[in-house]
Amino acid sequence: METYPIETLNTVPALLKEIPQPPKELNYRGTLPPTDVPLIAVVGSRQYTSYGKAVVEHIIAGLAGYQVGIVSGLAIGIDGLAHEAALRHQLYTLAVPGGGLDDSVLYPARHKRLAYRILEAGGALLSEFPATQRVARWTFPQRNRIVCGLCDATIIIEAAEQSGSLITARMATDYNRELFVVPGDIFSPMSRGTNQFLKLGAAPLTEANDVIDALRLTPTPAAHLAADPAAGAVAPAAQALLSLLSEPLEKDELIRRSSLPTEQANVLLMELELTGHVAETDGVYRRL
C-alpha cells in the first residue's frame, strides 16, 4: 500500500484566511483540490437513521457530474457516509480528521481504510494539528472550524439537539457561508437540532439542485473526476437489488426481498434507473 507522506502546506487557502484566527500552516496527505473547485461540507451526527443515510446518498448522487468537492470529518456516522458516497459517485473528497495525520493516531481507527481509499481516489487528508496529535475534546471544535472555513457551503444532514455538527452550522453562519439544513422527522430525536436551525431561518435542502443553483455549480469534464478503485460501477447495496431482478418484480416486492429501508431502496432504484441498469414500467422493475 502506498504510504502517502505527510506534507506541509505553507499557503493557507483563501477562504480559510477569512475566518477568525486562521491556521498558520496545514499538514496534508494526498492531492489537494484545485483552487477553482467549490467545496461543500457535509456533516451530521455520529448516530443516524436510515432516513439520514438515504439523504446523504440522495444529495451527493445529485451532485455527481458537477465541479464540486465534498469535505467532511472522517468520523463515524454521517461524515463517513458522505465520504463513501462521494467516492461512489466519483466526486473529489477531502477528510479533516479530529487529530494528526500519522497512521498511528489517525481517527477513528476503523476508518483508516476509508482514509486510504480517499487518498487512492485522488483526494486528501488535511489537518492543522501536528502529525502525531491524538484526538481530545478540544480538537474536534477546532477541526470543525477548518471543515467549515474551507467550504463555500455547509450541509447539515441529521443532528440531535446536542450534536457537535451544530457547532459547524453556527460557524457557517458566523463565517457568512451558505448553510443548508435537511428537514427531518419531527418525531425523531436525531432531527431536533436540524429542525431547530430551520426555525431560525436556515435554508432547507431537499435536493441537490438547491445547492447547484445557490453555488452556480458547473458540470465537470469526465477527465477531472476522481475514480475510486474500491467502489466499482455499482454500490454493494444497489448490487443487492440488481441480484434480485432475475425476473421482473413489483417495487414493493423488490424492496421487501432486499430488506433495505424503504427510503434507501427508493434512492438506489432511482440511481439504477439513471445509470441504465434497470427500467420501470407501471411499478414493475426489470434488469437491463
Image (cartoon, rainbow, N blue to C red):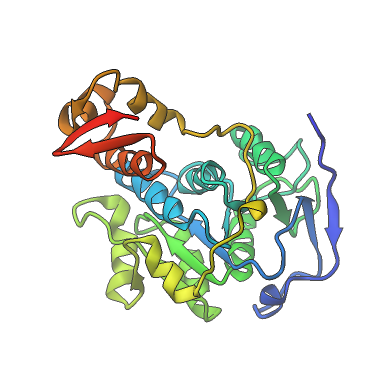
Judge left or right: residue 248 versus residue 139.
left
Judge left or right: residue 102 versus residue 222.
right
Judge left or right: residue 225 versus residue 84.
right
Q: Which residue is drawn at 52% across and 81% down?
A: 176
Taking depth in this image into account, of 213 and 52 the one nearest to the observer is 213
Q: Quadrant of the C terminus?
A: top left
Residue 18: image location, x then y, percent = 66, 80
Q: Residue at x 26, y 42 (%)?
A: 263
Q: Quadrant of residue 115?
A: top right
Q: Quadrant of residue 219?
A: bottom right
Q: Quadrant of the N terminus?
A: top right
Residue 39: image location, x then y, percent = 59, 65
Taking depth in this image into account, of 240 and 221 the one nearest to the observer is 221
Q: How many marks?
A: 0
Residue 155: image location, x then y, percent = 45, 63
Q: Residue at x 39, y 39 (%)?
A: 276
Q: In this view, does 60 lie above or below 153?
A: above
Taking depth in this image into account, of 11 and 265 the one nearest to the observer is 265
Q: Residue at x 60, y 62 (%)?
A: 147
